[in-house]
Image: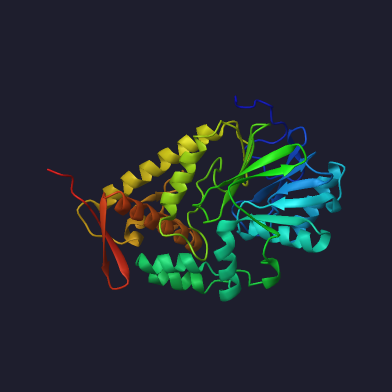
Amino acid sequence: MTTPTTPVTRFDRGSWAEAGAETVRPGVHRIPLPLPDDGLRAVNVYALEGLTEGVVLIDGGWSIPQSRKALEDALGGLGHDLGAISHVLVTHIHRDHYTQAVELRRLLGSRVYLGSGERRGLELLGELRTDQPVGSLRTLRRAGAHELAERIAAMDHGGFDPSVWEAPDRWLESEELRFGDAGLTVIPTPGHTRGHVVYLDRARGLLFSGDHVLPHITPSIGFELGGGTLPLGDYLASLRLMTTLSDARLLPAHGPVGDSVHARVGELLAHHDDRLTEALTVLGDRRLNAHAVAGELGWTRRKVAFADLSPFNQMLAVNETAAHLDVLVAEGRAHRSQEGDVDLYAVVPAPA
C-alpha cells in the first residue's frame, strides 16, 4: 500500500489546535478539543462516519464543559449531534483521552472500548483514589530526586473524581474490529502506558496513533500509576512494530496530521538512540543517579537547561532519563547498583 496523499486543508503546524473539524479523508474528521492549562494545547479526537449508523470516535477528550461544547459544535458542522456517537475507541487511559468517553457513555449510551493492558492501571486508580503521578514519584525517589518528588506531591493535581474512571464496555486485545463491511485493526503498543493501543484503518491507509507516535514531540514513557519494568524498552519495540506494517498517514492525538508513519517513527528511533549515547557520555567514568544525569542533558528541541524547566517538566525529564539508563543496563552497556533507596549507574567498559 502506498502512502495516501490526500491534501490536508486549513490546518497546519501552527493552527492545528483551532476549534472545528478538519476532513482528513471523506468520512474521517479530526476534531481538536481543548485541554485545561496544558502545554499540549489540545487533544485530537477523530470522528468516523460510515462504519455504523452513527459516528465512531477515536479517543474521547478530557471531561470538561469546554471540551464537550467544542465536540458538539464540530459534530454539528458535520451534520450530527452528540447522540450520533455510537462507539468511542480509546487509545489509552490518560484523562485527556478517556474521561470524556465515560461521560458520553453516561449521557448517550455510547459504547467505550479500551486496551486490556490498561486494566491494572484502572484498578489502581480505584484503589489509590488519587490523581497524583504515583509511579513517576516513585521513579523520582529512585533517581535521587527526593526534593523534587515532594514538590510534585504537594501540587494540586486537579482532585480525584471517581465518576470518570469507570471500566470500559469492552477490553481490547490484538484484534480486528468490524463495523459492517469496514474494519479497524487494534494493535497494542505498550510504552507510553502499558495498555496503549493504536487503530489501523488498512483500507484507507490511516493510523490513529494516540500518543504512541506524535509529529513534533516524544511522548512521556511509562507515565501511569503502575508502569512496566522496562517501559522504554517496550516503547522502542512498539515503534519498531510500526515499521513492519504498510506505511500510512499519521493521525496523532496531539499535533497536525502527518504524511508518513514510517518517516516519523524513524525520527523517534533516532532520537532515542541519540539520548542513549548522550546518557553514556554524561556518565563517563562516574557513578551517577538519574537526577544527576538529567541535570547535565539539554531538554526539548531548544536544548533547555534542566534548571530552567518547570517542576512538572523536570519530573518528566528525570523519568525519561531513568528509562534510558535502565535500557542501557538491559543492553549490557551500563551497570546499576544501589546506595540506600537510590539507583546509581556506571558505564560498562568495552572489552579489551
Residue located 85% across and 42% down the image: 77
Is 281 above or below relative to 99? Answer: above
- Comparing 181 with 44, the one in front is 181
Residue lying at 21% horizontally and 51% vertically, measured from the top left: 348
130 versus 320 height, above or below = below
Residue closer to the observer: 50 or 73: 50
Residue 237 position, x and y percent, is 44, 45
Taking the spot 72% from the left edge, 31% from the top edge, the residue there is 9
- Residue at x 48%, y 45% (from the top left corner): 238
The number of numbered discs placed on residues in the rendered structure image is 0
Q: Quadrant of residue 98?
A: bottom right
If the image is split into quadrants, where does the N terminus sit? top right
Residue 296 percent across, percent down from the top left: 33, 54
Horizontally, residue 22 falls left or right of residue 226, namely right
User: In the orientation shown, which residue stands out farthest toward the left?
Assistant: 352
- Residue 80 in sight in this render: yes
Quadrant of the image containing the C terminus: top left
Q: Position of residue 209 (x, y in %)?
A: 60, 43
Q: Give the colour scheme of this rendering.
A: rainbow
- Name above or below for residue 260 compared with residue 79: above
Q: Nearer the viewer, residue 83 or 141?
A: 83
Q: With 123 as the anchor, is 287 left or right in this view? A: left
Residue 131: tell me if it is visible: no
Asked where in the image residue 105 lies, by quadrant, the reply is bottom right
Please provide percent x and percent y for residue 128.
Answer: 56, 75
In this rendering, position of residue 309 left or right of residue 294? right
Residue in front for this viewpoint, 134 or 189? 189
